[in-house]
Image (tube, helix red, strand yellow):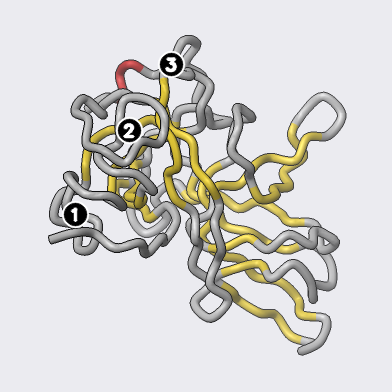
Amino acid sequence: MANTQAYFGFLQFQGGAGGAPTFAQSTRRIASGNSTAIYTGDPVTPVAGTGAATGYITSSANGTQPIAGIFVGCKYLSTSQKRVVWSAYWPGSDATGDVEAYVIDDPNSRFVVQTSFAGAPMTGTATTMTSGIQGQYAQFTLGTGNTSTGRSGAYLSAVSTTITSPFIVVDYAIGFGNGGDPTTQYCNVIVGFNNEMWRSNGAGPASINA
């Protein structure tokens, strides 16, 4: 059955070394003046300070900058509601003071993500099936998040041999509902972190290909 486009961001599949209920989830901060919306399942990037990361995060863009992990929600003091709000996404405004953000940053975590291409080809974004996806480095595109559910619209948009890409493909997510057919476009794959702030692997994490 052909897959359909229904991007959902990066959905945790395996918790790495972290156990329930947090799966090595960490707390970070979003500056109240950060006007960029961040959705559950979005990759996030550490905000740099003088010589080091500051503990603040912001939305990631595809590229080779290390990511801080995958955003999974936040809480903040709502300026308009005069109370603490728990939210699946940061809307980009309405916080008095810093936003407390939750990020999955276990360096061995695995995530299911939908691709924009078929079969995760060896290079580029072709829409034809090519075998041998394990170990290919991957880029993402944020897409459009859903303000009703707070869910990300991010997807995997390219694979290559660029060792500084943020993710690495581990396998197809065969049978994982829509996207479970690896022979058609918009297939789901399982990825791990590659270029992440807690993961230092030199020429690339060869041991993660499982």
Whether residue 45 sits left or right of residue 122 in the image: it is right
User: Pointer 3: what residue?
Assistant: 204
Tell me the kind of residue under disc 1. Gly
Query: Of callouts 1 and 2, which one flags the residue occurring earlier in the amino acid sequence?
Result: 2
Q: Nearer the viewer, residue 47 or 61?
A: 61
Point out the image quarter for the N terminus.
Answer: bottom left
Dot 1: within a 10 Å radius of its alpha carbon, few (fewer than 14), some, or many (20 or more) residues? many
Label 2 residue SS: strand
Residue 131 in percent (x, y) is at 19, 28
Mark 3: few/some/many CA within 10 Å (<14, 14-19, 20+): some
Q: What residue type is labelled 3?
A: Gly
Q: Quadrant of residue 123?
A: top left
Circle 1 SS class: loop
Asked if disc 2 and disc 3 are in contact, CB closer than 8 Å, the reply is: no
Horizontal side, residue 29 vs residue 161: left or right: right
User: Which residue is at 53% across, 47% downward?
Assistant: 141
Mark closest to the chain's N terminus, 1 or 3: 1
Please name the amino acid that badge 2 sits on. Val
Judged by depth in the image, the label closer to the viewer, 1 or 3, is: 1
Q: Find residue 180 and name its label.
A: 1
